[in-house]
Image (cartoon, helix red, strand yellow):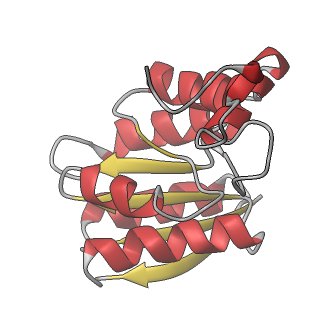
Amino acid sequence: MRIAFGTDEVTPVTDAVKAHLAARGHDVVATDEGDPWPEVGRAVADAVASGAADRGVVCCWTGTGVALAANKVPGARAALCGDAETARGARRWNDANVLALGLRLTTATVAAEVIDAFLVTDVDPDEAANIARVEPGPPDRPNHPDRPDGPDGRFAGGE
């Protein structure tokens, strides 16, 4: 699998993450290392959304900033995960394609467990309709939240 990787600071954990991905046979594409977190999140998400990478891994001190930045890219679904079960759920139920890790509390061992869970878990096909609602697309698309009839034929403009 081709994995886009980015971090706003290079640490022993980020080095271990890249080494772990490579040891598992993944093609690791380092998009941004040491750049500010908004650029890191965006660059990895762009690589995934464009198809240049199958999945992405982004890191910053809390993981929140890179996740927020990644989620601004259409087609990217970033999830901040601190444990393997959360990573499995993010893939299974949300079709997350970018994994965000916080460097403050994540050890190399925990990062490896989270990454492995994220990369081997398949999406639950029963979640397709919910996942589609997260990706609204153009306003004329039937499930767009701003369309007067909204998802499932319901008014989506609020009240």
Q: Is residue 82 left or right of residue 124?
A: left
User: How many numbered badges does the structure rendering display?
Assistant: 0
Residue toward you, 138 or 14: 138
Q: Position of residue 98 (x, y in %)?
A: 55, 52
- The answer to which quarter of the image holds residue 120 is top right
Task: Please say whether residue 143 is visible from this viewpoint.
Answer: yes
Residue positioned 66% across, 65% down in the render? 48
In this view, 19 is above or below 119:
below
Q: Residue furthest top?
A: 126
Q: Is residue 4 left or right of residue 60?
A: right
Residue toward you, 146 or 126: 146
Q: Is residue 107 left or right of residue 142?
A: left
Residue positioned 27% across, 64% down in the render? 12
In this view, 87 is above or below 124:
below
Residue toward you, 130 or 88: 130
Q: Position of residue 51 (x, y in %)?
A: 78, 69
- The answer to which quarter of the image holds residue 82 is top left
In this view, 106 is above or below 68:
above
Q: Position of residue 132 (x, y in %)?
A: 73, 36
- The answer to which quarter of the image holds residue 38 is bottom left
Q: Position of residue 151 (x, y in %)?
A: 70, 27
Question: In the picture, which quadrant includes the C terminus?
Answer: top left
Residue positioned 53% across, 70% down in the render? 44
Question: In the picture, which quadrant includes the N terminus?
Answer: bottom right
Residue toward you, 144 or 75: 144
Residue positioned 73% across, 72% down in the render? 50
